Image (cartoon, rainbow, N blue to C red):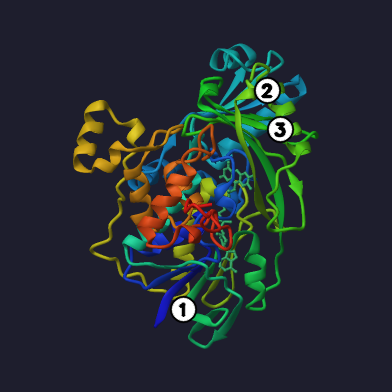
C-alpha cells in the first residue's frame, strides 16, 4: 500500500499534524521509534501555553505561538485534555529589568497577544502574595495557560487513529529512499511508502533530513531539569512565574500544573548526547536555589520527583518548517514554544502540503471530539456511584496517592493508542505519579497490564525494550 502521508515522530507535533490530516480522505501513517507515543521532548517540559510575547516579531515562532495559544483551549476541550488558563507573570527583581518588561510588552503587542498589562510591585504582590519582596514589577499575560502535554499528545494521536490513521511503534526510520512518486521509509527489514513525508522527529530531525540529502540545518539538545512538588504545595502560587530574561539567563520558573502539583525548573544545559535525560545534584541545586529566590517560603520538602527533558534547538533561531525537496517537509527545531504552537503548526503544515499538490477532500464522518477518560477522583459521589454501577472496576482503587481506579487503567490499555507498559499507564492515568511514585501500585498495574495484553508478567516492561520489571518466579512461586 502507498500512504498519502507518512509522519515521522509521534510527539505532540507529529500527533497533531496527523490529526489535522485525518480530517481529509487521506491514508496516513505515523511511524515512531519508541514503544509508545509522547516519549520524546513532549514527555518532559514546562507544560506552559505561552502567550506569545517572547518570540521575535515576524518570526514563524511568534506567528504560530500566538495562533496556537488561541487554539489550545478549544482543542483541549474537544480532545478531553486538561487545560487551565491561569495567566503568566514575567517578574522583574531589579528596577533596571523593568525596561525589559516594557520591551516584552511592546513585542507582545506587535505579535498580537491580547490583554497584556504591566504591573507595579503592589499590584503584583496582591496577585501573588508569596512572591519574593524583591519583586518590583511584572508583565502580566492573562492568556498564558497550563496544559498536560503527554495527555494532549496521546489524545492527538488517538483522535487521528479514531479517524483512520495507522500508528507503527518500535519503528525507527533508519533510511529513506526518494522515488519519483514518493518516498520509501525503511526500518530494519520493514518499509512503508508514502507520497508525502513530514519529518517531526524532534531532536533527531536533522538526522532524518540528512537521509534525503538535506544538511541545511542542525539540531542540538539542551537539557532542562525539573523538580515536582506534591499536591499540598499547590496554592503557593496561582500564576506561572517567569523571571525577566537578563544577562544572568532566563532563570527558573515556578508554576502550578493542571494536576495540582507545583513545577520548578528548567535548567538550560547544552550537551551532545540526544538521549541523556539524567538529572544531576548540581542541576537540582540550581533549581532549588532559584525557586527560593522567586518564592522564599516554598516548601521544598514537598518534592516528590525530579526529571529532565531535551530541547531540540535548531541553528536558525526559528522553527524550521521547510521543504528541501518536493513532498518532503521538515518540521524541525521545534523548541519552546513548540507545545504552545503545536495546534497552529499542524494547520500550517497541512497548508504547506496542499501547496505542493496534496489534495484535501474533506471527510464527511470526521470525528472531531474524543471522550475524556473517566477521572474518578474528580467525580461527585453521585457520579462515582453511577460509573461503578456501569463497571465495578471503577470501584477498585489501584493508585492510592492519586486515587486511580482499575477501570481507568483498563480504559488506558484499551484506548487508541493503548498503554503497553507501566510508564504508558502512568502518563495516561496518573497511576504512579503521586507521592510514592508507584511503589505501592506498580505491581498491581503490572498485573493488570499482563492480564489485558495477554502476556506473561515477566514480559511487562517499564518503558519498552528490555526494561523488564520481573525476571521470573521465586521457588515458592511468587513473582520476583
Ligand atoms: C525543558 C523544556 C521545557 C519546555 N517548555 C515548554 C513550554 O512550557 N511550553 C512550550 O510551548 N514548549 C515547551 N517546550 C518545547 C516543547 O516541549 C516541544 O516543542 C515539543 O514537545 C516538541 O514536540 P515534537 O513532537 O516536535 O518532539 P518530540 O516530542 O520529541 O517528538 C519527536 C518524536 O520523534 C521520534 N523519532 C525520533 N527519531 C525517529 C526516527 N528515526 N524514527 C521514528 N521516530 C523518531 C521520537 O521518538 C519522538 O517521539 C519545552 C521543551 C523542553 C525540553
On screen, residue 109 above or below 337: above
3 and 1 marks in contact (CB < 8 Å) = no
On screen, residue 142 above or below 202: above
What residue appears at the point 75 percent right and 19 percent down from the top-left corner?
Answer: 95
Q: Give x and y (percent) for residue 19.
A: 39, 59
First of labels 2, 1 by sequence position = 1
Provide the residue designation for mark 1: 194
What residue appears at the point 55 percent right and 49 percent down from the top-left corner?
Answer: 43
Left or right: residue 405 versus residue 135 is left
What residue appears at the point 70 percent right and 65 percent down from the top-left corner?
Answer: 217
Q: Give x and y (percent) for residue 137.
A: 65, 19
First of labels 2, 3 by sequence position = 3
Numbered disc 1: secondary structure: strand
Q: Residues within 10 Å of mark 3 (few under 14, many from 20)?
A: many
Provide the residue designation for mark 3: 287
Spatial CA distance of label 2 from label 1 is 50 Å
Spatial CA distance of label 2 from label 3 is 11 Å
Q: Nearer the viewer, residue 367 or 277?
A: 277
Amino acid at each position: 500500500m502507498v500512504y498519502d502521508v507518512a509522519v515521522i515522530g509521534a510527539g505532540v507535533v507529529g500527533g497533531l499534524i496527523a490529526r489535522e490530516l485525518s480530517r481529509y480522505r487521506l491514508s496516513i501513517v505515523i511511524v515512531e521509534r519508541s514503544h509508545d507515543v509522547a516519549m520524546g521532548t513532549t514527555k518532559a517540559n514546562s507544560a506552559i501555553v505561552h502567550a506569545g510575547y517572547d518570540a521575535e516579531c515576524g518570526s514563524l515562532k511568534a506567528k504560530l505561538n500566538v495562533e496556537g495559544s488561541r487554539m489550545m483551549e478549544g482543542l483541549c476541550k474537544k480532545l478531553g485534555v486538561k487545560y487551565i488558563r491561569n495567566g503568566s507573570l514575567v517578574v522583574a527583581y531589579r528596577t533596571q529589568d523593568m525596561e525589559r518588561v516594557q520591551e516584552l510588552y511592546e513585542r507582545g503587542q506587535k505579535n498580537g497577544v491580547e490583554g497584556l498589562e504591566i504591573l507595579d510591585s503592589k499590584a503584583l504582590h496582591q496577585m501573588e502574595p508569596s512572591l519574593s519582596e524583591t519583586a518590583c514589577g511584572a508583565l502580566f499575560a492573562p492568556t498564558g495557560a497550563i496544559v498536560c502535554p503527554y495527555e494532549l499528545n496521546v489524545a492527538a494521536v488517538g483522535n487521528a487513529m479514531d479517524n483512520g490513521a495507522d500508528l507503527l511503534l518500535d519503528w525507527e526510520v533508519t533510511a529513506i529512499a526518494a522515488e519519483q512518486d514518493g518516498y520509501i521509509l525503511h526500518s530494519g527489514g520493514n518499509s512503508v511508502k508514502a507520497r508525502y513525508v513530514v519529518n517531526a522527529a524532534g531532536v533527531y530531525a536533522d538526522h532524518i533530513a540528512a537521509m534525503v540529502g538535506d544538511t541545511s540545518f542542525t539540531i542540538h539538545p539542551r537539557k532542562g531539569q525539573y523538580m515536582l512538588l506534591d499536591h499540598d504545595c499547590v496554592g503557593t502560587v496561582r500564576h506561572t512565574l517567569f523571571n525577566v530574561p537578563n544577562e544572568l539567563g532566563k532563570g527558573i520558573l515556578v508554576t502550578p500544573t493542571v494536576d495540582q502539583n507545583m513545577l520548578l525548573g528548567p535548567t538550560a544545559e547544552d550537551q551532545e548526547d540526544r538521549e541523556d535525560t539524567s538529572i544531576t545534584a548540581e542541576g537540582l541545586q540550581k533549581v532549588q536555589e532559584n525557586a527560593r529566590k522567586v518564592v522564599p517560603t516554598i516548601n521544598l520538602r514537598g518534592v516528590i520527583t525530579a526529571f529532565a527533558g531535551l530541547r531540540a534547538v535548531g541553528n536558525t533561531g526559528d522553527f524550521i518548517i521547510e521543504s528541501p525537496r518536493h513532498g518532503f517537509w521538515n518540521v524541525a527545531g521545534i523548541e519552546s514554544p513548540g507545545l504552545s504552537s503545536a495546534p497552529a503548526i499542524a494547520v500550517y503544515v497541512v497548508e504547506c502540503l496542499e501547496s505542493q499538490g496534496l489534495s484535501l477532500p474533506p471527510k464527511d464522518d470526521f470525528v472531531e471530539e474524543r471522550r475524556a477518560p473517566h477521572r474518578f477522583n474528580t467525580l461527585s459521589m453521585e457520579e462515582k456511584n453511577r460509573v461503578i454501577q456501569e463497571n465495578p472496576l471503577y470501584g477498585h482503587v489501584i493508585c492510592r496517592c492519586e486515587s486511580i481506579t482499575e477501570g481507568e487503567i483498563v480504559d488506558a490499555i484499551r484506548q487508541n493508542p493503548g498503554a503497553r507498559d507501566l510508564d504508558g499507564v502512568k502518563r495516561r492515568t496518573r497511576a504512579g505519579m503521586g507521592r510514592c511514585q508507584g511503589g505501592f501500585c506498580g505491581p498491581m498495574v503490572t498485573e493488570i497490564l499482563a492480564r489485558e495484553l495477554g502476556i506473561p508478567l515477566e514480559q511487562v516492561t517499564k518503558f519498552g525494550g528490555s526494561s523488564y520489571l520481573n525476571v521470573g518466579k521465586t521457588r515458592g512461586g511468587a513473582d520476583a
